[in-house]
Image (cartoon, rainbow, N blue to C red):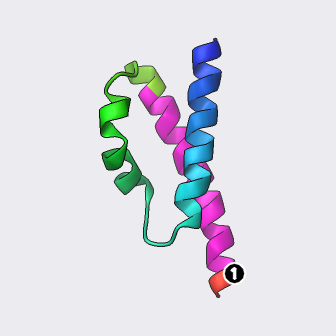
């Protein structure tokens, strides 16, 4: 249970940072974090990806509105 919460928070925080940086998307983040993600269970990788993707989409829209 604690592992699921930690992976969710890690994905959320990573997604916020990825979304705020222009031209860095979730795919590039998964490639950069691949050595770390190899140690996770498959279900935790999916959980990380889903939370990162939703947070990146939200924070990316905030950056898009600010830049016009």
In the rendered image, residue 39, in percent from the top left (x then y), is placed at 35, 22
Residue at left 35%, top 55%?
28
Magenta run includes residue 20: no
Residue at left 59%, top 65%?
20
- Magenta stretch mostly in which secondary structure? helix
Q: Mark 1 points at which residue?
A: 66
Magenta run includes residue 57: yes
> Quadrant where the N terminus lies?
top right
Residue at left 30%, top 34%?
35
For residue 58, above or below residue 14 = below
User: In the rendered view, does 26 fall on the left or right side of 13?
Assistant: left
Q: Furthest-top residue in view?
A: 1
**Within the image, what quadrant is residue 30 found in?**
top left
Q: Furthest-bottom residue in view?
A: 68
> Quadrant where the C terminus lies?
bottom right
**Within the image, what quadrant is residue 58 found in?**
bottom right
- Estimate how packed mark 1 is, as few (under 14), some (14 to 19) or many (20 or more) residues with alpha carbons within 10 Å: few
Magenta part of the protein: which range? 45-65
For residue 12, above or below residue 67 = above
User: In the rendered view, does 24 fall on the left or right side of 67?
Assistant: left
Which secondary structure lies at badge 1? helix
Residue at left 53%, top 67%?
21
Q: How many labels does the image show?
A: 1
For residue 11, above or below residue 32 = above
User: In the rendered view, does 61 fall on the left or right side of 46?
Assistant: right
In the rendered image, residue 50, in percent from the top left (x then y), is placed at 52, 40
In the rendered image, residue 14, in percent from the top left (x then y), is placed at 55, 47
User: In the rendered view, does 22 fall on the left or right side of 12?
Assistant: left
């Amino acid at each position: 249970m604690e592992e699921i919460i930690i992976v969710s928070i890690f994905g959320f925080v990573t997604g916020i940072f990825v979304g705020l940086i222009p031209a860095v998307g979730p795919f590039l983040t998964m490639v950069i974090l691949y050595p770390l993600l190899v140690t996770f269970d498959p279900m935790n990788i999916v959980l990380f990806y889903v939370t990162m993707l939703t947070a990146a989409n939200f924070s990316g829209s905030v950056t898009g509105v600010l830049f016009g």
